[in-house]
Amino acid sequence: MIPASLVFALVAALLHVYIFTMESLTWARPATWKRFGVASQADAETTKPLAYNQGFYNLFLALGAFAGIAAVLFGQPRVGWTLIFSSCGSMFLASAVLALSGRKYLRAAATQGTAPLLAVVVGVLAVLAG
């Protein structure tokens, strides 16, 4: 179960790096802001500082998950699981907030929240079994 949890954490981290890229690096491109439901280029420019900041939140969550994976793999399971549960738990809770923001966000919330939820659930089961 440990490998499965680590794979789910890795998928979650990689997705959050991708989200960081969109929010912090390519926000002003029409393909990006349209994906987030922004109405116009002017609105994208207005919201760019907020998206930039939010993107870094996603990057930091991803870095926590990457560090946790590395710690588990390199023999520091307490540190590793703490980082994985904290980072992936925060990713999942953020997806829950997104889902509660409106029906149009349910698909994005499911995409954003499934892998981190599985990382935490499978990881907890692995830790309890071990």
Image (cartoon, helix red, strand yellow):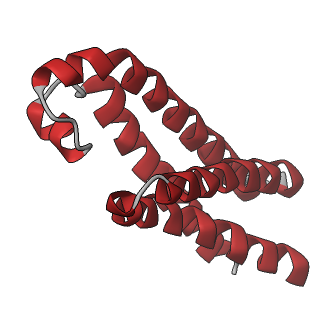
Tell me the residue at 58%/60% (across/down).
9
**Residue 70 x/y as whole percent:** 67, 49
Residue 110 left/right relative to 31: right
**Is any atom of residue 130 visible in this view?**
no
Q: Is residue 119 placed above or below 36 in the rendered structure? A: below
Residue 20 left/right relative to 78: left
**Residue 47 x/y as whole percent:** 32, 21
Tell me the residue at 37%/42% (across/down).
19
Quadrant of the snapshot with the N terminus: bottom right
Q: Nearer the viewer, residue 54 or 61?
A: 54
Q: Is residue 81 placed above or below 35 in the rendered structure? A: below
Residue 14 left/right relative to 46: right
Q: Quadrant of residue 50?
A: top left
**Residue 83 x/y as whole percent:** 75, 47
Q: Nearer the viewer, residue 3 or 74?
A: 3
**Residue 5 x/y as whole percent:** 64, 71
Quadrant of the snapshot with the C terminus: bottom right
The number of discs equals: 0
**Is any atom of residue 84 visible in this view?**
yes
Tell me the residue at 43%/50% (across/down).
14
Q: Is residue 117 placed above or below 52 in the rendered structure? A: below
Residue at the far front: name it.
102
Q: Is residue 22 placed above or below 110 in the rendered structure? A: above
Tell me the residue at 70%/67% (across/down).
120
